[in-house]
Amino acid sequence: MAYTKNIVTTVAYMIGIKKNIVEQIAEENMDLLDSLCNNQNCQTIRYLCKLRTSLMLNFKKTDNEMKYNLTNIDKLPWFDTENIKQLEKWNCHIIKANGTSSKYMETINKYINENIGQCKDLFPEWVNWNYIKDLFVIPRFTQEKVIKGEFAKYMANIEWYPFQNYIHWEPYDCGGMLINDAKFFSVVYKQHNEVYVYKSNYREADEEIKEKIYQFINNTESVEIVVDCENSNPYKLCSVLAGLNHRETIKIQKIILFDDIHTNPGWDLIDKFVQLPVEHIMVERVKEQKSLVDIKMTATVCMEHYQNRVSSFLLFSSDSDYWGLISSLPNAHFLMMFEYSKVSDAIKKTLSRHEIYYCAIDDFGTGKIDEFKKFVLFRTLKKHLPNLLQYNGKELVAEIYNEARIPAEQSEMDNFYKKYIKTLKFVADDNGNMQLEIQK
C-alpha cells in the first residue's frame, strides 16, 4: 500500500526544512511545492519558523553578539538576511533596537500566532486544523519559563525533531513523522491521544496497480468505463480517475453510469469533476422492490461491443453476477474494479482462473477529491435551506453528511459547521425576495 505526501510536503515546507529536502519529500508532486513557494501566507510562516529554529540553535551566541558587539539579528550569519528583509516588507517587523534573544523569540512567536490562521486553507477540511496549528503555536509563549522549557526539550531531543527543525510537540523516536501522510497522521493524532480513522484520505494505489490499468487501456483499440452505481461508490470512482495519469487514460471513450433512484446522490454530479464524457442512464423500476440496473448494464455492454465495436471495458462493480456478462463476451476484454467490503472470494478466484485482472477501488485514496465531496455536500445542504429554521445546525451537518454518504470525523463536520452553516447569509434579489446563501 502506498500513501500520499501532500500534507507532509506542506508541513515540511512551512516549518522551514531546506528546499532540497522538501523536494525529496514531495517527489513528483512539484506542482504542490510550486504553489507553496508562491503563497505569501505560507512563505511568511516558513520564514518565521526558520528564524525560530536558528534562534533556538544559536540562542546564547545571538544574545552575546547583540549585547557585546551591538550586532543585530539581520547582520548575523546564522540567520537568513533575505528572509528577514521579506518579512519586514510583509509587515512582520522582526528587527528591534536593543534586542535580546528572549525578546526576539517572543516577537517571532507573536507573528507566528498572528499569521498561522492564514494557512488553514492550505489543508483539506478532513484534516484537524487544530492539530496542525498546535505544531506551530507555543501556548503562553510570553512566559519565560514556557520558552525555557521548550528550549530545553528541543536541545535534549534535537535528533527527534524533523530534520532538526523546531516544532511544538512532545518528541520521541517516531521513525520520522514526515515519511508520508499516513505516518504523519499516526504521530500527530497520537500526540492528542487519538487515532485517525479515515485512512482512505491519505491512501494511494501502488504504482504496480496503476501500471496494470495503463497496460489494459493501451493494449486495446477502444475502451469504456461502465459503472454499476448500485454496487459502486461515486467518491471512489472519482478517486480512481484522480489517481491515474490523464495522459494514460485518453483512450477511454466515455463513462457510462447505470443508476437507480435509490443510489448515492454523488452520481448526479460526477460529470462536473471528471475529464471524460459521462453518459448517465437512470434505470426505471417496473416493481419498486426490484432493480433492473444489472439487466440494463448487461444489455448495453453487449450493444457497445457488437454494435459500436468497443473492445474493452473497465467494469466498476462488486457484484459477482457480472461474471455472466464477462463469460458471454469471449472476444471482449474486461478489467474489474470492486470494493473490498462488497466483493466475494468466489468472483476473485474465478477472475484469476481466467487471467482477468481485477483491483480494488478502495486502494485509491479519496484525499484528492475534496472539491467533489464539498460540491455534493453543498447540493445536499441547499435542499434543506427552505426549512432550515427547524434544524439544530450541528444536527443538520450530521444529516447532510449521512445523506451525501460521506463518512467523516467529527472534527471535519465541526469545520463544515463553522465554515458554512454558521456563516449562512440572507440575501435579497432585485425584487426583494429573500433567500439563504452559502458563503463559499
Image (cartoon, helix red, strand yellow):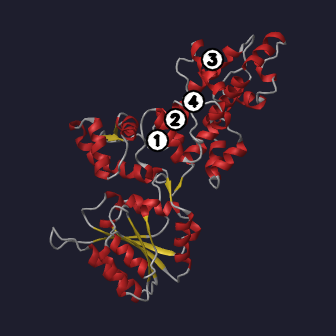
Q: Is residue 370 visible?
A: no
Which sits earlier in the primary sequence, circle 3 or circle 2? 3
- The residue pinned by badge 4 equals 136
Q: Position of residue 231 (x, y in %)?
A: 31, 66
Q: Helix or strand or loop: what does disc 3 sit on?
A: helix
The crowding category of the residue bearing disc 1, from other C-alpha atoms within 10 Å (few below 14, some 14 to 19, many at least 20), is some
Indicate the secondary structure of the residue bearing disc 2. Answer: helix
* Cα distance between the residues tagged 2 and 1: 8 Å
Instruction: Name the residue that disc number 2 marks.
Output: 132
Report which quarter residue 208 is drawn in. Answer: bottom right
Location of mark 3 (residue): 106
| x, y percent for residue 407 | 35, 49
Residue under label 1, please give it. 127
Binning the other alpha carbons within 10 Å of mark 3 as few (below 14), some (14 to 19) or many (20 upward) gives some
Q: Quadrant of the C terminus?
A: top left
**For marks 4 and 3 on the same chain, the one whose residue lies earlier in the sequence:** 3
The disc, 1 or 3, on the residue closer to the chain's N-terminal end is: 3
Mark pair 4, 3: CA separation: 14 Å
What amino acid does circle 3 point to? Glu
Q: Residue at x 72, y 15 (%)?
A: 96
Above-or-below relation of 328 to 378: below
